[in-house]
């Protein structure tokens, strides 16, 4: 049996890795000259930048985490998170609810006051259960934390009205116990989002080293520069073509974004096409900056809810690993989300980089005169947006593909907010569950 895997991101590569362990015959078809998808890293003047955004290795699943770490052998560093939120010129401990005492006093008071008032109202049955993400922020954290941080930050990253977003996504938002909120307000130290408090990162090569570790043993099964353009079934076989060359497979697994997959299929009904068109996602621009200074700060990454500042998050790769910048230099990666057709999407790379440099200089995070190099990259599929209709759209699409016999693994193929650990687990479970193929 010959298996075709569409897409050579982490999902495609890890599927290949697990199939290889079982001795299966497979090929991975990747459109770009290089594999790794969102995990791509580039080297510019000795600086390594993760161009799909800042990636760290962490997981609630100990077994998967140990597996990912073991795959990188000695090419790994463990770090303790030191993440902040930049609020009114102050660095607030992350998550925001665990850093209330870092806020100006009045803001600290309002966060605690509305949190408690909210609890009392909930106890008395005076609060309607939330039906969308915005309402959930108010319902769970109260007006103070919601309006000072959660709402502005989430509006900035999603670029989508929060009242039109489903609450599916909130499982991953840290929800601290009441004691923690009170302690945090009084300045007694607490930690939130603890499964990410310690994280791993490759010593050399950026996050792409993880994708490459999966690829290492299966290189001969990977075909790059192969953009899947047409898929059809002939005499019980799948025929996959890029317009010049064809491959035949008995089984097909897609890890490419659903929108891209549907471009390759024939005889798709209007109902399905509409469901695919209605799936919402956002894109990301990353700006990697090399700096002629040994150290900018001790931060892992920084969230910036301020609407006047273009980037929502900056990370400091040379604080993850000193080997991703030349000796005596440091680096920074700014992330800016956008949606196709919006104002940011129309800005040129030059406008973007100038704006980011001006903003960061103004905030005192960098001195523009220290910049050695800068790289701007755009990634079309960054975050799945769970709008209120996504479940129904996805149900229709997944049923259609299941009936056709195309299996789906990965973030934009399953249309699910999957981190690397979940993608690898999905690939492993898929291969385990298909031992008869
Ligand atoms: C900004 C950001 C930060 C993140 N940070 C973290 C983090 O810190 N930790 C973590 O665990 N996870 C993180 N993630 C999630 C992580 O990036 C994903 O879980 C993972 O990369 C998904 O891999 P994938 O293979 O499913 O998708 P992708 O990486 O998107 O791979 C899909 C592949 O399909 C290829 N393709 C597309 N169309 C075609 C076609 N027609 N023919 C052939 N090939 C095609 C693409 O080129 C790509 O290589 C982050 C994601 C983002 C966006």
Image (cartoon, rainbow, N blue to C red):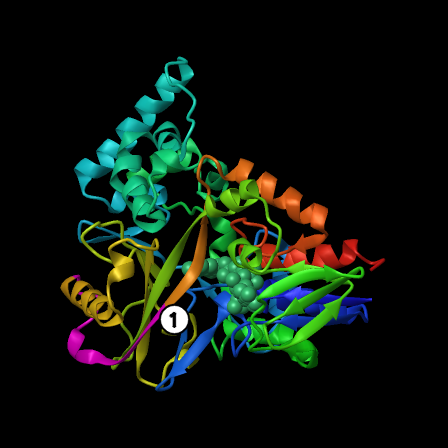
x, y (%) of residue 99?
32, 45
| Rendered-image quadrant of the N terminus | bottom right
- Camera-side residue of 279 and 313: 279
x, y (%) of residue 306?
22, 50
- Camera-side residue of 35 and 68: 35
Tell me where residue 31 sits by quadrant: bottom right
Residue 55 drawn above or below residue 155: below
Element at label 1: helix
Residue 416 drawn above or below residue 297: above
Residue at the extreme right: 436
Task: Tell me, yes or no, whether the highlighted magenta stretch contains residue 413.
Answer: no
For residue 198, side relative to residue 431 (left or right): left
Q: Which residue is mark 1?
A: 317
Instruction: Confirm whether residue 62 shows in the render.
Output: yes
User: Bounds of the magenta span?
Assistant: 363-377
| Rendered-image quadrant of the C terminus | bottom right
Which residue is drawn at the image coordinates 38% and 35% (left, top)?
164
x, y (%) of residue 334?
31, 65
């Amino acid at each position: 049996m010959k298996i075709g895997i569409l897409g050579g991101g982490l999902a495609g590569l890890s599927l290949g890795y697990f199939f290889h362990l079982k001795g299966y015959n497979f090929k991975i078809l990747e459109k770009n000259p290089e594999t790794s998808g969102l995990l791509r890293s580039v080297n510019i003047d000795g600086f390594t930048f993760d161009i799909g955004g800042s990636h760290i290795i962490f997981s609630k699943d100990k077994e998967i985490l140990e597996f990912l770490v073991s795959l990188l052998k000695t090419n790994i560093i463990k770090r303790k998170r030191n993440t902040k939120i930049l609020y009114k010129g102050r660095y607030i401990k992350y998550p925001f609810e665990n850093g209330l005492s870092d806020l100006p006093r009045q803001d600290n008071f309002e966060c605690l006051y509305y949190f408690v008032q909210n609890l009392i109202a909930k106890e008395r049955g005076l609060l309607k259960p939330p039906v969308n993400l915005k309402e959930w922020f108010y319902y769970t954290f109260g007006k103070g934390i919601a309006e000072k941080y959660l709402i502005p930050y989430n509006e900035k990253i999603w670029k989508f009205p929060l009242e039109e977003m489903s609450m599916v996504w909130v499982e991953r938002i840290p929800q601290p116990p009441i004691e923690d909120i009170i302690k945090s307000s009084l300045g007694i130290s607490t930690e939130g989002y603890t499964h990410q408090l310690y994280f791993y990162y490759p010593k050399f090569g950026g996050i792409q080293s993880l994708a490459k570790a999966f690829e290492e043993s299966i290189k001969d099964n990977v075909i790059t520069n192969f953009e899947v353009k047409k898929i059809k079934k002939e005499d019980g076989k799948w025929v996959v073509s890029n317009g010049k060359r064809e491959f035949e497979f008995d089984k097909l697994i897609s890890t490419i974004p659903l929108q891209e997959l549907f471009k390759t299929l024939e005889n798709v009904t209007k109902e399905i096409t509409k469901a695919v068109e209605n799936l919402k996602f956002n894109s990301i621009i990353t700006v990697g900056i090399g700096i002629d200074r040994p150290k900018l700060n001790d931060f892992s990454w920084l969230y910036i809810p301020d609407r006047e500042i273009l980037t929502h998050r900056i990370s400091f790769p040379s604080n993850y690993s000193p080997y991703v910048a030349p000796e005596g230099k440091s680096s920074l990666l700014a992330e800016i989300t956008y949606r196709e057709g919006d104002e940011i999407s129309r800005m040129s790379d030059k406008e973007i980089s100038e704006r980011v440099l001006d903003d960061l200089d103004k905030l005192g995070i960098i001195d523009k005169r220290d910049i050695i190099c800068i790289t701007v990259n755009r990634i079309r599929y960054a975050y799945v947006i769970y709008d209120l209709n996504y479940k129904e759209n996805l149900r229709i699409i997944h049923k259609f593909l299941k009936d056709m016999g195309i299996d789906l693994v990965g973030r934009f193929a399953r249309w699910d907010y999957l981190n690397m650990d979940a993608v690898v687990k999905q690939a492993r479970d898929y291969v385990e569950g298909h031992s008869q193929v």
